[in-house]
Image (cartoon, helix red, strand yellow):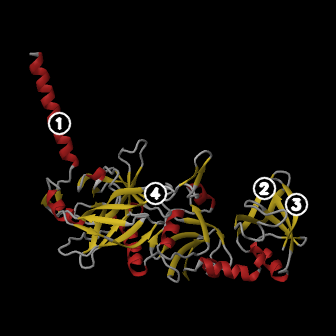
Amino acid sequence: MRLLSRLTSMLLMLILSQLTIANHLPQSLDGKAMPSLAPMLTKVLPAIVNIVAQGDLPPQHPQLHQTHPQRGPEPPKAAEKFMSAGSGVILDTKKGYIITNAHVVHDAKLITVTLNDGRRFIAKLIGSDTGSDIAVLQIQAHHLHALNLGNSAHLQVGDFVVAIGNPFGLNHSVTSGIVSGLQRANLGIEGFENFIQTDAAINSGNSGGALVDLSGNLVGINTAILTPDGGSVGIGFAIPVNMAHSVMTQLIKYGHVNRGMLGVMVQNLTPALADAFKLSNIKGALVTDISPDTPAAKADLQAGDIITAVDNDTIETASGVRNAIGLHRIGDKLSITIHRKGKVKHVTLHVADPHEVTKLIEKHNHLFAGMDLRNFKSQISGHGIITGVQILNINENSPAWHSQPSLRPGDVIIEVNHQPIADLQALDDIARKHTKSLLLRVLRAGGSFYMVLE
């Protein structure tokens, strides 16, 4: 009797678990019953490829020849080889273009692509962008299948997605899950981050593979996982297809992404800051600084402005501004929407070449060449409120680096030629009149010192 009761309980639990699973599966797609993902995958899988990259590991030591105290000089060691595996997605059947992650093919001398039907091809690297971790390959092949592009801007948390790739060499493996989060940034994985987070299992070898919706449209490129031990724990990240395809287009056309700058520095607009600025129901990025002689300065952007859109794309975080600018080339025209003191303003500017901006700054006064500066105002113990110009970065070949005493990042210039300076404009006004040398008073670690910059 006890055995029968136990079997009955187990059977009941099994039925309930199956019902629970069934309730979490999509019931229909376009009005049709969808008990299985197989029909969709039959169309999608031929567009997913396996990628094997081979090359030479860079030498760990700069010295090719080493001397042993007893045996004398040793012959140089042969370069060590590496082989890495990943995935890719065919997006153009006529030209054979394949999109993948840049880290999958980094430093590769030979790239082999294996199709779903077993055919193998040597791929040509069209272009690679480490900032976005996107690369484009090309193969010469017939009878290819490509994925349709979805719109990652329409994704919502909770949408069902499927990850396809070649984890651990298991070709065309499929895992499913949901969109767990959107616009994930500041993870330190890439330079430009706007990840889709998913709980669809992603493992080593999935990089460069497809994240598709239930219609089989490509919505992301699987890229990374958050894991304590190298295995999937249900936190995977994919590059949104809108971002990936934009980079792909530039790589195909130019071979690289030639990013520019606007000269604007921003931070996240927190609820506390929104209250302090007396803003309600406004999301965006708060402008903190504007660099001189940049498009942002010429467009009259100001500290305290709230950037809410770039080219009609909504901006909610500081990383959103950086990503939006990072997808545009030098010379591209941008439309930016800002909120300033309760009013909405639209400004138009062009993305500038960072090198040209640097040359323009150096032309004003070569003494500040190789230095990144910003306005500074802060309460400092023992000194009260200090205003001036703070040094963010210094090129080691610059005059400031080799001066005695030398300037270093973090220093604050508070006087020039015995005149207090409040901001970059004041510094520039004095520097224009004295191009041979400047007497600076510099604040460092609570104390100050004088130095001559020449």
Indicate whether 214 appears above or below 306: above
Rate crowding at label 2 as few (under 14), some (14 to 19) or many (20 or more) other CA atoms within 10 Å. few
Residue at the location (70% across, 72% down)? 370
Rate crowding at label 4 as few (under 14), some (14 to 19) or many (20 or more) other CA atoms within 10 Å. few
User: Foreground residue, 235 or 383?
Assistant: 235
x and y percent of residue 274 in the render? Answer: 58, 60
> Which picture quadrant has residue 61?
bottom right
The reply to whether residue 158 is in sight is: yes
**Camera-nearest label, 4 or 1:** 4
Which mark is drawn over residue 449? 3
Q: Is residue 229 left or right of residue 321?
A: left
Dot 1 amino acid type:
Leu
x and y percent of residue 59 in the render? Answer: 51, 57
Rate crowding at label 3 as few (under 14), some (14 to 19) or many (20 or more) other CA atoms within 10 Å. few
Q: Residue furthest top?
A: 1
Q: Which of the marked residues, 4 or 3, is nearer the chain's N terminus?
A: 4
Which mark is drawn over residue 16? 1
Tag 4 residue? 78
Q: Is residue 297 left or right of residue 6?
A: right
**SS category of the residue bearing label 1:** helix
Label 1 with label 3: CB-CB less than 8 Å: no
**SS category of the residue bearing label 3:** strand
**Camera-nearest label, 2 or 3:** 3
Label 2 with label 4: CB-CB less than 8 Å: no
Which mark is drawn over residue 159? none
Tag 2 residue? 379
**Camera-nearest label, 4 or 3:** 4
Label 4 with label 3: CB-CB less than 8 Å: no
Label 4 with label 1: CB-CB less than 8 Å: no
Location of the C terminus by quadrant is: bottom right
Indicate whether 344 appears above or below 83: below
The residues tagged by marks 4 and 3 sit, at their Cα atoms, a distance apart of 53 Å
